[in-house]
Image (spheres, rainbow, N blue to C red):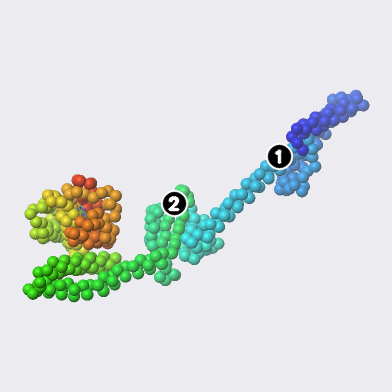
Amino acid sequence: MGSHNYWGVERWRMALILFFALLGGLLTDYWMVSLLLTLIGYIGWLLYKVHQLDKWLENGAKALYLPDSNGIWERLIHQIQQMQKKSLARKTRMSKLLKRFQGVVTGLPYATIVLNRHNEIDWANKAANEYLSIDLKKDRGQRIDNLIRMPEVLKILRKNTCKEIEIALPQYGERQIAVQLIPVQEDLKLFIARDVSERNYIQQMRKNFIANASHELRTPLTVITGYLEIVRDDENLTESLQPAIQSAAEQAARMQSIIEDLLTLSRLENSVLNEDAEQVINMHEILHAICEEQTTFIVDNSHTLITHSDPTLKIMGAEAEVISVCSNLIHNAIRHTQKGTIITIEWQKNRLGEACLKISDNGQGIPAAQLPHLTERFYRVDKGRSRDKGGTGLGLAIVQHIIKRHGGYLDIQSTLGKGSCFMVCLPVERVVEND
Ligand code: ADP
């Protein structure tokens, strides 16, 4: 029924009631009583209608059991039905959306677990069962750290960080799982896990390949270098051949140093720092020895080395590796800067108590965009010049590896035209306190 004539029906109804009240009054002469009785009858009828409506709503407001009504009541019922239809449509839309979303998350190849603020499981997809043995039916409401009892997992849960960590679950043998915690809201976190066994296997294959290839090349190259030296030193060598042999010997020596550096990198990558091999390192002495050695290579006083080192600051570490860090950085500062450069070598504790080696030069500097790439293998700022100077492009990669396995960090700052500063810092725990 349209909204326009429901008041018409109501007007007729009121007119009918008034007519009955008047009729009662006319017939009995008790006007007030007649009016009162008609009004009571009307109120009773109204209450009956409200009761009918209430019952209908209580039973789910089904279209099949529509209360028989007209006028304002029909209008009311119509409005309720419209609202119901709208909310049903909205509900269907929402549940469709939710189903689609759940379908997407369920189908994700990553194990996805929704956690609340207490790290209790709210929801998990199928992959969570496969990777982490989490069964939603059984484990909903359980704390995740009770199900995955690993110190690394505990750490990321406690710190609430997004950092990805790798774990090996005992029940899966060799399988490597990378897990990550993503805080979404204060009381909602996503715990994501994925299988990285294959990625790690490929990485390991790559490392092994480089190690094996370098190893295989080392012996033949030693033989070639040996023969080249013999030929070079031979008095019968014709003069016209001398430059060619000299150049071949230099290139072979360069290849040898690349292979040695690659082998060093492989060894660093494939092993952890052996605590038994660590010793107290007197950096002050080492730095002085390296500076003395390097000074012999500096021709025509082209570079000046200035050292400020704390003789009492000693550290624990693998000595050969730490020496390699120092000489790589000092050698770079000499090799990659122009004549007249002053190089300052500082060995001191910083404000945090870390032991820091800072090698700064006032050379030509390095463009800012290239700084993040310096520790990549074979990355050179100026390819041609670096090769001419006998660089392998592996020095800073080696430095980075050594410092990382000693628990420290490498920081590189540089301004074009002003110079560069390479700083390595080792953690407080490595500092040897003097008695
Ligand atoms: P390389 O064997 O070529 O020295 P490194 O890994 O040690 O390889 O260094 C990478 C590149 O970083 C170098 O090729 C050089 O271009 C640049 N570099 C390193 N140290 C300095 C420095 N002190 N000043 C300017 N450039 C530098």
Viewer-side residue, 93 vs 257 = 257
Q: Nearer the viewer, residue 17 or 387?
A: 387
The quarter of the picture showing ligand 1: bottom left
Asked if 250 appears above or below 180 in the picture, the reply is below
In the rendered image, the quadrant that contains the C terminus is bottom left
Q: Could you say where residue 202 lies in the image, as x and y percent from the top left?
A: 37, 67
Please tell me which residue is depicted at 23% across the width and 50% down the height of the picture: 366
SS label for mark 2: strand
Which comes before the other along the chain, label 1 or label 2?
1
| In this view, 331 is above or below 237 | above
| Amino acid under disc 1 | Gln
Residue 319 occupies which quadrant of the picture? bottom left
Q: Amino acid at mark 2?
A: Pro
Specify the label residue 319 is tagged with: none
Residue 285 appears anywhere in the view? no
Is 406 displayed left or right of 121 in the figure?
Answer: left
Count of residue discs = 2
**Which residue was labeled with disc 1?**
79
The residue under label 2 is: 183
Residue drawn at x 22%, y 46% is: 416
For the N terminus, which image quadrant?
Answer: top right
Q: Is residue 166 visible?
A: yes
Q: How many residues crowd mark 2 within 10 Å: few (<14), some (14–19), many (20+)?
A: some
